[in-house]
Image (cartoon, rainbow, N blue to C red):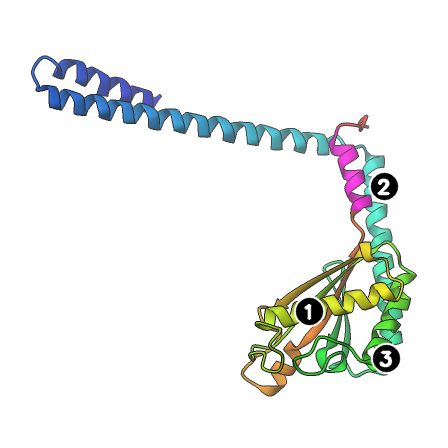
Amino acid sequence: MKNLSKLFTLALAVVLMTSCVSKKKYDEAMAAAAAEKSALESELASSQEENARLQENSNKLQQNLNMSEGEIAKLSETVKENNAKISGLHDAIAEAFETYDENQVKVDYREGKLYITMANDVLFKSGRSSMDKDSKDLVSTLADILKSNGDLDILVEGHTDSEPVKIHRQYRDNWGLSTARALSVVRSLEDMGVDGNRLTATGKGDTQPIASNETKEGREQNRRTEFVIAPELDGLYKIYKENAGGTSSGS
């Protein structure tokens, strides 16, 4: 209302000015009024879009609130089952690699996901992305465990230190090297029988250091390959969509 009142006042002023100002000033005033009108129309359209978005969010929230106790319990049970799988997998992998130093292979549980961190010096030679027999044997141990847990997604992340790549010209930078290493691991896992649909490879380069790149020890820690294992989320998403989509009858 405030903006509309402002536009009305401006229009009235233009009318009053037509009898005592030059055509040039009249045209300028009309142009200003037109610009103000266009701005108000744009503001109105944006407000309508925002209102529609908020209404949609409100509808989704209401649908979620309508989930029955039984449906909530089902979702909760699925989450518990997934957490139990991750916990069991943690113990199995930790036992399989218990002969390795923690600086070589580390198994960690964080925020519902399992992280297996392997130092790059146990998988790759400096500046290279191919794995030798010993490296593949190491990955094969992990693959055997992963194959028995077929409903878990596996993200393989390659990480480097901040030192420039010097040995191979085929890698433009650490991004390229880290990506090539992640792909090499993923392809090996698939060759070893892990379902490729569960695998994703990504290279992080030197963007996510876990120690200082100013020291030799820190750079060694940053050169790593991480396996991030999480529950396959399609089942949870399906339950959520069924309830959020209004198939729930309520309680």
Residue carrying label 3: 98
- Left or right: where does residue 25 sit relative to residue 50? left
CA gap between label 2 and label 1 equals: 41 Å
Residue carrying label 2: 74
Three-letter amino acid code at the position of disc 2: Lys
Pick the residue in front: 164 or 51.
Answer: 164
Residue at (79% x, 45% y) in the render: 234
Identify the disc placed on residue 105.
none
Where the C terminus falls, by quadrant? top right
Residue 218 visible in the snapshot:
yes
Residue range of the region highlighted in magenta in the rendering: 234-245
Pick the residue in front: 22 or 57.
Answer: 22
* The magenta stretch spans residue 187: no
Instruction: Give the residue furthest to the front.
Output: 169
Residue 6 in which image quadrant: top left
Q: Residues within 10 Å of mark 2 (few under 14, many from 20)?
A: some
Residue carrying label 1: 180
Residue at (82% x, 68% y) in the render: 188
Residue 76 in which image quadrant: top right
Pick the residue in front: 126 or 247.
Answer: 126
Relative to 62, say whether 105 is above or below: below
